[in-house]
Image (tube, helix red, strand yellow):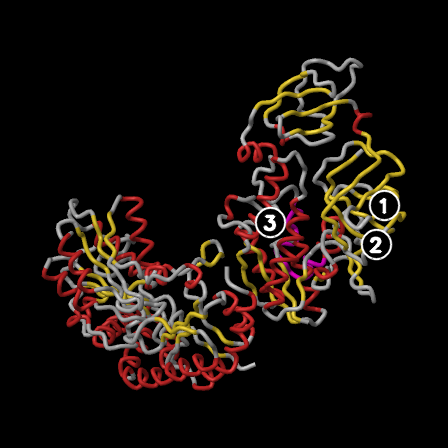
């Protein structure tokens, strides 16, 4: 059975070039913090990688803080900014559609440190409403410690008005972070012109390895560290640097930047093909996320079919996708993103996400189109709670 | 066939799943999440319903090499099993939740969903045997007498049984454990589950008191004389002797047993062992796990508890009630339990007991 991997928003296949760099670095010895020859060699690889990633992002090399995951970088941004702010700044501004790696640390601060969360409104497409967001920022400027607004939504793909909100935040002297894990390498992204103070990016979403990510943070942005130790990254993040992963991340960042336009247009075509094929094959299907989305995310609601059942039946046909919803103790909960978009829980549960990546082929898209009708029919027969 | 293997995380269902794969079927493993908050149910390696159990089930599925999913059946379980358990107890009856779980969850909600999704059957680790015949599927006792679970499966209809697979019916438990070991399942030495999976402490009376309240009431004899006080009538079961805390000795100085629980006036009626003796049992909500019996009287065996003895009887089917007259009296039988009729090793049908004499 030929499989179709359409879960590239979860993780991507490594680029051959990145894999080659990773393997070659992994065969070398050297701690980038050591002063001897082997250490210096590793340090050089790390710093060259930092420069490549910075160049791909329109950032300065010293603004890149390597971490072990996007989740870690988001936690560092959220807790690091909050703990470093003045005591009267007891609130945080964000959106209700953030990834759990932002929402959960925010909710943890709310619970443990009595932080007030001000969450912006989003529309039915999953786009943050700019005017009301800026009003809220202005209204609460004296109490807001910092703002964090994702660059694009990981479930429905909607691009967010980050630069508009960042401009307002800067005017109000409120630091702003953006989780750009899904956007990096997929849409043009420039750290300095976007106007944010900090940004999260991750390696494995762009053909790089798992276990490496970065918080890009302006040099004058003060962050309280989460991990204390050797102080390897600007004294903000400790831990021996993962030279092979960092080198491969840089290779992937460079290549995805070079191929950004050609990949995006190819992926957009595949997306269109998938949307047309599925909407032709199945009745009563709704495409979510509006018109301004990431090139590779296709999020459908199949009324009357449970996302879990669709996933199981697609998996049995070799089609790998995601319900986009989080598990609580193994039980799928309706997605908080869709709920924030105004979906009824039952409708939210009837949704799945296909995510197309640089390695996706036309055959994989055709495979989905060829099985989708039978799968949805069966899932609808099983019903939705 | 395309088969859903229900995997609790225990030894039996893991081996059952592996055997269905060996038999050449296309199998996926499914763990049933029966509580929206699994920590609330039994914790530790005691058989079902915990996060560890779903992890164990997943590891077994990995080793077998089948896809694995968790199905949320919390609402169905609460409605069909837990609520029923509470309402039966508050009506003075003694329900069997495992039997309801088979009837309402595993071979109803799960089988229905499986069939809708194009699967043919649900396989479980129950100890019972199924044979197909020109009269439809026939349910028999397992070879392992001590583990036999045909009693809790006799509530299923032939239609449900036609979508069931019990691959362990011909194997004794010790062999199943050895097989689990040989297959490399880390759960091979997990203890058997006991008691009721949704009562975390194993303290059934305490669990019921927490949910149904504990209104103090009278313990009386058949004449209505007050002999003592109780802490919530529904925590007593017909035939119970211990924990009555009676201070006034019986006239004859002999032990007293619960004869009846009367939830309406919150009374527990006690009496002698002789008064517990019954020979007539009758029940409603009759289910045939084999061909429907012809109207009238037949010889057979009656079983009224999960691991109780099969008692020789004459049973009757009048089109509405299934009744049995026992050859020898039985002492202490709670309404709400299932009457299961066997002919030799074959389970014939079942009814929920609502009358005894």
- Residue pictured at 26% horizontal, 74% vertical: A49
Q: Is residue B336 magenta?
A: no
The residues tagged by marks 1 and 2 sit, at their Cα atoms, a distance apart of 10 Å
Q: Residue B6: x, y in percent?
A: 63, 59
Whether discs 1 and 2 lie on one chain: the answer is yes
Q: Which residue is mark 2?
A: B293
Residue A279 lies, with reference to residue B79, above or below; the image says: below
Q: Main secondary structure of the magenta part?
A: loop
Q: Left or right: B314 with respect to B276?
A: right
User: What residue is shown with label 1?
Assistant: B315
Magenta residues (range): B179-193
Q: Nearer the viewer, residue B178 or A317?
A: A317
- Residue at 15 percent across and 45 percent down: it is A88
State the image coordinates of residue A341 (x, y, percent, origin top left). Answer: 33, 63
Residue under label 3? B80
What is the crowding at mark 3: few (fewer than 14 residues within 10 Å), some, or many (at least 20)?
A: some
């Amino acid at each position: 059975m030929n499989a179709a991997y359409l879960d590239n928003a979860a993780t991507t296949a490594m680029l051959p070039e990145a894999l080659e760099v990773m393997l070659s670095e992994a065969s070398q010895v050297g701690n980038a913090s050591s002063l001897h020859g082997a250490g210096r060699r590793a340090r050089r690889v790390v710093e060259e990688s930092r420069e490549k990633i910075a160049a791909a992002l329109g950032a300065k090399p010293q603004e890149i803080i390597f971490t072990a995951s996007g989740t870690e970088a988001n936690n560092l941004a959220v807790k690091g900014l909050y703990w470093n702010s003045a005591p009267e700044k007891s609130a945080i501004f964000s959106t209700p559609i953030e990834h759990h790696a932002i929402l959960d640390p925010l909710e943890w601060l709310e619970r443990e440190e009595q932080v007030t969360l001000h969450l912006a409104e989003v529309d039915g497409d999953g786009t943050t409403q700019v005017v009301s967001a800026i009003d809220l920022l202005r209204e609460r400027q004296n109490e807001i410690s910092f703002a964090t607004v994702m660059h694009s939504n990981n479930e429905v793909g909607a691009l967010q008005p980050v630069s508009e909100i960042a401009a307002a935040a800067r005017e109000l002297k409120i630091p702003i972070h953006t989780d750009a894990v899904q956007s990096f390498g997929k849409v043009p992204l420039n750290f300095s012109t976007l106007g944010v103070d900090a940004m999260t990016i991750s390696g494995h979403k762009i053909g790089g390895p798992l276990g490496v990510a970065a918080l890009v943070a302006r040099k004058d942005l003060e962050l309280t560290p989460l991990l204390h130790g050797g102080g390897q990254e600007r004294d903000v993040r400790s831990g021996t640097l993962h030279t092979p992963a960092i080198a491969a991340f840089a290779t992937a960042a460079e290549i995805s930047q070079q191929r950004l336009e050609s990949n995006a247009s190819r992926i957009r075509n595949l997306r269109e093909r998938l949307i047309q094929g599925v909407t032709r094959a199945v009745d009563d299907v709704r495409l979510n996320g509006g018109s301004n989305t990431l090139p590779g995310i296709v999020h459908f609601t199949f009324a009357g079919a449970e996302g879990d059942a669709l996933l199981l039946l697609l998996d049995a046909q070799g089609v790998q996708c995601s319900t986009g919803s989080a598990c609580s103790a193994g039980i799928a909960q309706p997605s908080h993103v869709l709920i924030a978009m105004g979906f009824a829980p039952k409708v939210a549960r009837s949704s799945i996400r296909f995510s197309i990546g640089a390695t996706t082929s036309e055959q994989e898209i055709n495979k989905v189109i060829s099985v989708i009708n039978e799968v949805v029919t069966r899932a609808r027969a099983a019903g939705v709670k | 066939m395309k088969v859903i293997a229900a995997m609790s995380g225990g030894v039996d269902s893991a081996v059952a799943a592996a055997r269905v794969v060996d038999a050449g079927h296309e199998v996926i493993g499914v763990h049933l999440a029966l509580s929206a908050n699994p920590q609330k149910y039994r914790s530790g390696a005691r058989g079902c319903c915990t996060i560890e159990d779903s992890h164990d089930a997943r590891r077994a599925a990995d080793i077998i090499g089948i896809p694995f999913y968790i199905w949320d059946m919390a609402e169905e379980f609460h409605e069909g099993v837990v609520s029923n358990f509470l309402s039966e107890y508050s009506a003075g009856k003694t329900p069997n939740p495992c039997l309801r779980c088979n009837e309402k969850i595993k071979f109803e909600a799960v089988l229905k969903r499986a069939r809708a999704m194009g699967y043919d059957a649900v396989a479980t680790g129950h100890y019972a045997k199924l044979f197909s015949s020109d009269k439809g599927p026939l349910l028999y006792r397992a070879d392992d007498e001590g583990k036999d679970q045909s009693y809790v499966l006799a509530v299923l209809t032939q239609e449900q049984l036609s979508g069931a697979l019990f691959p362990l019916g011909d194997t004794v438990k010790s062999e199943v454990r050895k097989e689990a070991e040989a297959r490399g399942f880390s759960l091979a030495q997990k203890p058997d589950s006991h008691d009721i999976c949704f009562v975390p402490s194993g303290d059934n009376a305490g669990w019921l008191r927490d949910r149904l309240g504990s209104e103090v009431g009278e313990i009386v004899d058949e004449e209505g004389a007050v002999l003592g006080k109780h802490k919530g009538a529904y925590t007593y079961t017909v035939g119970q002797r211990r924990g009555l805390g009676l201070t006034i000795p019986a006239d004859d100085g002999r032990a007293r047993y619960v004869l009846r629980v009367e939830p309406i006036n919150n009374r527990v009626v006690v009496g002698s062992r002789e008064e517990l003796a019954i020979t007539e049992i009758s029940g409603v909500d009759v289910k045939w796990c084999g061909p429907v019996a012809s109207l009238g009287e037949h010889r057979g065996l009656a079983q009224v508890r999960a691991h109780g003895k099969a008692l020789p009887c004459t049973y009757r089917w009048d089109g509405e009630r299934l009744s049995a007259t026992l050859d020898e009296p039985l002492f202490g039988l709670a309404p709400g339990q299932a009457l299961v009729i066997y002919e030799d090793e074959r389970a014939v049908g079942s009814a929920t007991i609502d009358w005894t004499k």
